[in-house]
Structure formats: structure tokens, C-alpha cells
Image (cartoon, rainbow, N blue to C red):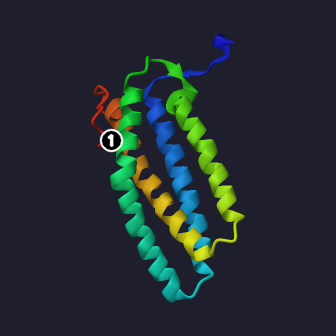
Amino acid sequence: MEKLKPLVSRHWLFALAGVMWTGVGVMLMWRAWIWLSAMKPAWAMGIALAGVIIAIGFYYFMFTKTVAKNIRRLCGLPDPVGVLAFNSPKGYILIIFMISMGVALRHSPLDRRILALIYAGMGGALFLASLHFYRQFHIVRVQKRPCDESSGR
């Protein structure tokens, strides 16, 4: 079974993590945009602005620590490494929980204005945090420098 595990150079894990975080962030912001576009412009602008503020807060107070921890973990992995190691086992459990929470929220009677605010805030924070992974990829792959474990801060 070990022979079937696809291996990649560690620097590709930074790119994969970045793509995943960017993709989820954009998907959440797109869903928020759909809900906002169905609202009166004044509501949509207010919620969008509040979403940006929440995104910056989530990014700064929550996600920079999470990304830094992930980058430190990835820097400590052997090279080459299994392609799915871009996320920790605990991270995969968190992903399943977040997907389940998203499905539950979308099917709940919660007002779409609140959902748009939550999705815009979380999506924006994920997108901003994904940039740290791309920076680390650039450091290791393009600049050929060693892992910069402080890059997530």
C-alpha cells in the first residue's frame, strides 16, 4: 500500500494548501455574492462592508496563527512526502466539520443576510490566509531558500 502513495516534493504542499484555501474562500465569497445580489443595494453594501471587516478580523486574529502552524508543520516534513500531507489529519476532520456546518447553515431558516455576512467574512479570511502559502511556495521553489517557518505570521 505504501508503494501506491503518490509522493511530491514538499514545496508543492504549500501550493496545494494555498489552492485549497483560495478555492474554498472564493467559493464562500461567491455564494455570499449571490445572496447579496438578490438584496436591496443598501443592505448589500452594508453587509458586504461588514463582511470585509469580519474577514480582516478573522484573518488577523485566527487564520494567521493557523497558517503559521501549518507552515511550520509542512516545513518539518520529509522530502519527498505524500501529496495529501498538505493538510494534517486533524485538518481533514475540521474540513468535514466545516462542510457539514455549511450545509446545515444553508438549509437552516437563518436569514440570507446573516448567511451572506458569515460566508463573506469566512471566505475573505480564507482567501487572505491562502496568500501565506503562496509566499512560502515562492520562497522554497522559486528563490530556492530554506523553509521560512515564520512566513505565516
Q: Is residue 146 above or below residue 103?
A: above
**Which residue is at the front of the view, 78 or 143?**
78
Q: Residue at x 56, y 27 (%)?
A: 83
Q: Is residue 33 above or below residue 63?
A: below
Residue 98: where, in percent of width, then height? 59, 49
Type of amino acid at the residue the image marks with label 1: Gly
Q: Is residue 114 left or right of residue 2?
A: left
Q: Is residue 153 left or right of residue 137?
A: left
How far across and how far down the image is residue 58, in percent? 40, 57
Query: Which element type, helix, strand or loop, lies under badge 1?
Result: loop
Q: Is residue 90 above or below residue 96?
A: above
Instruction: Name the residue located 30 percent from the left edge and 32 percent from the top edge.
Output: 149
Residue 151 x, y percent position in the rendering: 30, 39
Q: Quadrant of the N terminus?
A: top right
| Nearest the eye: 24 or 107 | 107
Locate residue 109: give its quadrant: bottom right
Query: Which residue is the site of mark 1?
Result: 152
Q: x, y percentage for residue 24?
A: 56, 52
User: Of all residues shown, which one is farthest toward the right?
Assistant: 107
Mark 1 residue crowding within 10 angstroms, few (<14) / some (14–19) / many (20+): many
**Which quadrant is the C terminus positioned in?**
top left
**Figure quadrant of residue 101:** bottom right
Which residue is at a point 68% across and 64% down the rendered structure image? 106
Q: Residue furthest front?
A: 109
- Give above or below for 62 relative to 43: above
